Amino acid sequence: MSTNLQSLSSKFESLDEARRNLSWVETRLNDSSTNWAEYGDIFREYIGVLAKSFSEGNLDASECEECYSSLPRKNYPFNLSHYEEWFENSVQTHGHPQTSAGTAIWQEGLPLDMWIDEHLEKLTITKYSDSNMQAKHQWLFDTGSERQIVETNLHHNSASEFEKAIDGTFIFVEIDEPTEKYHSSAAWKRQFIRPFINNDQRVKVVSRPGPRTKCIEALKDMLEVRTAYFDINRADDADGIFIDRVDPDWMYIRSSLITHEATEHGFNNTEPIRTELEFRDIVDGKVSVQKRLSDGRNPRWWKLPRDFADVTTEDEDSTPAGNERFGRNGMSGDANE
């Protein structure tokens, strides 16, 4: 732990120095001679030095935010909103950071569409294969004094919502409404944001499998190392896959196998998997059916298209019935599932 400082630096040359000077605040707050009315002055004094250091380019906005966010709030009549307001007001007094050419890094009042084009460094769009998952948009903006990621799903399609997201992420942002031709919500979406996303060279699209997709692929892999039987009793005793010779375009999978894969992938039930298969036009509606065995039991099976997985039939397979990983005794669920 650093030694408590007796005096506050007139400016901070680095983030480490700003962090060290937090101990000055602690010392003043713990001084028995400090009265209640002076607490706000202590915080403002420290934040004022932060703002001066920011204005002179020694600290960036995120480093300043880290420091004033570390100031104590419990047991004091101040919160983070107070600290943010004091910092912003102090920066207005000291001035915003300057570029080497002497112009202000922070630009005021730029229309939203122009601000996006001016400050976007990269947009990464992550698209998921699951039907229930929206694409994630990560907008990396760099204003010169701040470099932050703004994450959106679909609310970038609304100019006002996108502006709120940006304003809530950056400390120093003053953005005007979009250029007049994009004022309407339809114009913003159809004429600016969608073409921007589709055509700008700074946009990168990444594809990721969702949990439903991972489960379906694992189910296929599991079926393809098993054997399908034309006799339902043998299928139930062995690998849990039955093909009816009367209707060979379909195969029946013991429901316990589906439940096992769903559980392995974090699902509490199999409905999300059925929903995803229906979305992909692999099944249509209900998939669970009961089929009677010779011993009188009526276990449940999932009816899936034969081409869902490349399953070996008993006539083609010369290996013993069963499978080491998913043998009959390894099925989850009871016999009537």
Image (spheres, rainbow, N blue to C red):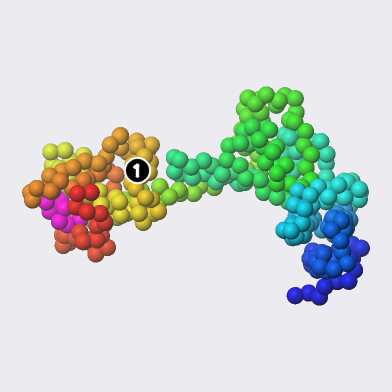
Residue lying at 77% horizontally and 33% vertically, measured from the top left: 176
Horizontally, residue 41 falls left or right of residue 197, namely: right
Q: Position of residue 155 (x, y in %)?
A: 61, 36
Q: Magenta stretch: residue 193 in it?
A: no
**Quick check: 73 above or below 301?**
below
Q: Is residue 59 visible?
A: yes
Q: Which residue is disc 1 drawn over?
A: 271
Residue lying at 40% horizontally and 47% vertically, measured from the top left: 212
Tell me which segment is drawn in magenta. Answer: 229-240
Q: Is residue 218 visible?
A: no
Q: Position of residue 134 (x, y in %)?
A: 51, 41
Horizontally, residue 103 falls left or right of residue 296, namely: right
Find residue 180 and report its image quarter. top right
Find residue 198 and report its image quarter. top right
Horizontally, residue 99 falls left or right of residue 131, namely: right
**Quick check: 285 above or below 77?**
above
Which amino acid type is shown beneath numbered disc 1?
A: Glu
**Quick check: 124 above or below 185?**
below
Q: Position of residue 29 (x, y in %)?
A: 82, 64
**Quick check: 172 above or below 10?**
above
Quarter of the image with the N terminus in it: bottom right
Horizontally, residue 40 falls left or right of residue 184, namely: right
Residue lying at 37% horizontally and 50% vertically, measured from the top left: 268
Crowding around mark 1 (Cα neighbors within 10 Å: few <14, some 14 to 19, many 20+) is few
